[in-house]
Image (cartoon, helix red, strand yellow):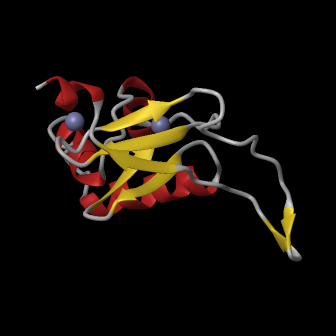
Amino acid sequence: MAIMEYLLEHKTHPSVEEIYSALSPSIITLSKTTVYNTLKLLADHDVAQMLTIDERNICFDGDTSPHAHFLCKKCGKIYDIFSQGAVKEVLPVNLEGHEVTEMHYYYKGICKDCLKE
Ligand SMILES: [Zn+2]
Ligand SMILES: [Zn+2]
C-alpha cells in the first residue's frame, strides 16, 4: 500500500532503489525484493506502469493513462508527454494475429531545462 501511495505522490518515475530508500526508514521489514515484487504486481494489474526507457534503471509510473515518456540524455530526468500525436490511442488491437495489450512510447533527447544552459 505504501508503495502505491508513494508512486501516486511522486510523479517523477521513481526506480526501485529510490522507493526503497524513501520507505525503508518507516517500514523496517521492507526489502528491495519486496519493493520490486510489489511494483511488478502493480504493473501486472495495470495500476502502474513499468518503464524500461532507461536501460540502467527500471522505473515505475503510477499514472496508467496513455502518455509517452521522454528521457533526457543529459540529466537523466524522465518527463511525461501528454501532447496529441505523441501517443496513438491505446486499443487492444491485433497485430498479425498477436493481441496487443500495452504500447510504450519512448522519446530521448535533451530536455528543455538542459537546452537553456
Ligand atoms: Zn535534462
Ligand atoms: Zn509517466
Along the viewing direction, whichever of 25 and 11 lies nearer the viewer: 11
Q: Left or right: 102 with respect to 109?
A: right
The answer to whether residue 27 is seen in the rendering is no
Quadrant in which residue 71 is drawn: top left
For the residue pair 71 and 52, the one nearer the viewer reads as 71
**Residue 10 occupies quadrant:** top left
Residue at point 44% right, 48% down? 107
x, y percent for residue 97: 89, 76
Eyeballing the image, is 80 above or below 73? above
Instruction: Identify which residue is drawn at 40% across, 56% down.
Output: 53
For ligand 1, which image quadrant applies?
top left
* Residue 2 location, quadrant: top left
Residue in the foreground of this view, choosing between 94 and 18: 94
User: Residue at 45% of width from left, 32% of height from top?
Assistant: 80
**Residue 66: image location, x then y, percent:** 64, 37
x and y, in percent, of residue 102 in the image: 68, 56
Number of numbered labels in the structure image: 0
Q: Residue at x 36, y 40 (%)?
A: 13
**Camera sees residue 12:** yes
Residue 30 vertical position relative to residue 88 in the rendered view, above or below: below
Against 101, is 2 above or below? above
Foreground of the two, 2 or 102:
102
Residue 67 in the image: state x and y as whole percent. Answer: 58, 36
The single residue placed furthest to the left in the displayed view is: 117
Question: Which quarter of the rendered picture does the C terminus lie within?
Answer: top left
